[in-house]
Image (spheres, rainbow, N blue to C red):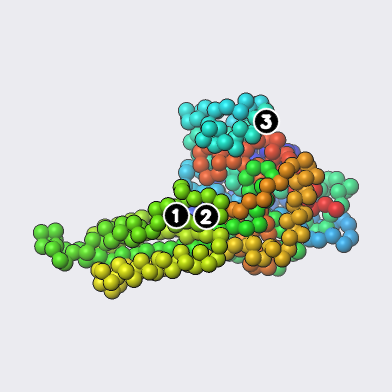
Amino acid sequence: MRAYERLLNYIQFDTASDAKSPTCPSTEKQLALGRALTDEMRAMGIADARIDEHGYVYGSIPANAEGLPAIGLIAHMDVVDCVPSAPVKASIVENYDGGPVTLKNGLVLDPAVFPEVAGAKGKRLIVTDGNTSLGADDKAGVAEIMTACERLLTDPSLKHGKICVGFTPDEEIGRGADRFDVAGFGADFAYTVDGGVVGDISFENFNAAAGTVTVHGRSVHTGSAKNIMVNASLVAMEFASMLPPQERPEHTEGREGFYHLNEMKGRADLATLEYIIRDHDQSRFEARKARFAAIADYLNGRYGPGTVEVSVRDSYFNMRRVIEGRMDIVERALDAYRAMGVTPVVAPIRGGTDGARLTFMGLPCPNIATGGMNFHGRFECVAVEDMDTMTDVLIRLVTE
């Protein structure tokens, strides 16, 4: 079976995660795909395939050659819930001409807006009907790993060390590594297969934190409000205005950090702002978090102690600090790309992966491509041939 055929099967499972849920996995429906993958792994000959009580799927292929490292391949099963995630109705654009594609609901996938798509010219392009995300992030990675495993198991000429496979829940809400069993996984190092266009490899990512701003106002009748009322919503807006407007995601690129207002709620007596804080540089990252506290101090001086409360919680850190000591892992991936005729592109991740946290948990874990494009939206797509290429890259990556 080819990787794209598996993808078309896996996207029929709605696996959206939910940041508001306290459970692991955050949604029960992720378990359905996890169980299906476990059954499929066992059927292809991965005898120790299993799913644990938290929805993590593990399995391994024993080594068939001496002296080779145990290499892990990891992808996540969940998808974002910021756009509808089901029912996914995909179609294939045959011999894509490189121009705009009108999706079935009338939306237009336009390379002028999404330039990476033009690189799929001449290929078979898998798109949605425009009503949901595709789920290629990261079911394309899951499909490529599964297809690579099937080929490794059926072709004894491919010599390799132990291959460890892991599929995680809840990556999209930052919890994918929370309960990952690094020791039980058994790999010397690993790769997350969770990147974009073919050739991508990343071993650095944002330092990340979540910031919550809570504003306690004082609500009284508007007719007698003078010098008494403190409107929490307006104070929250004032807080937001004191963050540099040029340091937002829509105005940054590369290694430039940002503050992103992800959610806001408010009334006169209580308001909350939910932010994500990102920066590749550790010192600038710390300065960003300190700015939150400084703004709160200023507003409390203006409106009274306790008006503004700030909570900042670190999410993950830049894995480059660790990977720089294991550049042989990166070189192995670069060599695999080149062997398959692909020019590798090393670029920082403007986000994070399970691999970032796993690296700090003792499992060095750069991130490589899936071939997918335009993740987290209705224009998500992937080329059939790019999934084949990434399957070949994975096999080259783990073999002698």
Using the rendered view, name the quadrant where residue 266 is placed. bottom left
Instruction: Give the x, y percent position of residue 186.
Output: 74, 64
Please name the residue that numbered disc 2 is placed on.
256
7 and 203: which one is in front? Answer: 203
Q: Position of residue 118 (x, y in %)?
A: 61, 32
For the point 64% across and 33% down, the residue is 120
Marks 1/3: CA–CA distance: 38 Å
Cα separation between marks 2 and 3:
34 Å
- The residue to which callout 1 is attached is 247
Where residue 295 sits, quadrant-wise, is: bottom left
Q: Which mark is residue 123?
A: 3
Q: Amino acid at mark 1?
A: Glu
Instruction: Say whether disc 1 or disc 2 marks the residue closer to the N-terminus.
Output: 1
Query: In the figure, is residue 399 to the left or right of 325?
Result: right
Q: Nearer the viewer, residue 253 or 378?
A: 253
Task: Categorize mark 3 by other alpha carbons within 10 Å: few (<14), some (14-19), many (20+).
Answer: some
